[in-house]
Amino acid sequence: ALMADDAIGSAQLKTLSTVQHLWKMGDRYEKLSFQYYGDTRMWWVIAWINKRPAEFTNRIGDIVFIPTSLEDALSLLGV
C-alpha cells in the first residue's frame, strides 16, 4: 500500500494537509481536480504531489493524496 510519506517525500511537503482518494475505474486527474478544486487545469498538482505523472501509473485501489488547500500546494511549488 502507498503511504503518504512515499507519495509526498520531502519534509516541506509532509506539512501539506491532504485527503485520500481511492483510485477507481474511470478516474482521471482532471476529474479529481474538478471535484476537489472546481478547475480541471489543476490536475498536475495532484500528479506532482503523488509523484505519478500520468493516470496509467495508478492502479485501481491505489490511494491518491489530494491537497486540501490548493493555495498551500501551489505555494510549496512557488507558483
Image (cartoon, helix red, strand yellow):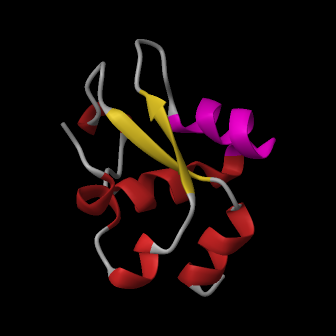
60 shown above or below 43: above
30 shown above or below 9: above
Residue placed most toward the observer, 39 or 15 = 15
Residue sitting at x 63%, y 30%: 31
Q: Quadrant of residue 13?
A: bottom left
Q: Quadrant of the C terminus?
A: bottom right
Q: Position of residue 43 (x, y in %)?
A: 58, 48
* Furthest residue toward bottom: 78
Residue placed most toward the observer, 19 or 34 = 19
Q: Position of residue 35 (x, y in %)?
A: 71, 32
Is residue 22 covered in magenta?
no
Q: Quadrant of the N terminus?
A: top left
Residue sitting at x 30%, y 21%: 61
Q: Quadrant of residue 34?
A: top right
Residue placed most toward the observer, 17 or 54 = 17
How many labels, in total? 0
Magenta span covers which residues?
29-40
60 shown above or below 21: above
Residue sitting at x 40%, y 25%: 23
* Furthest residue toward top: 25
Magenta-drawn stretch, dominant element (helix, strand or loop): helix
Q: Position of residue 28 (x, y in %)?
A: 50, 29
Is residue 35 covered in magenta?
yes
Residue sitting at x 36%, y 43%: 54
* Furthest residue toward right: 38
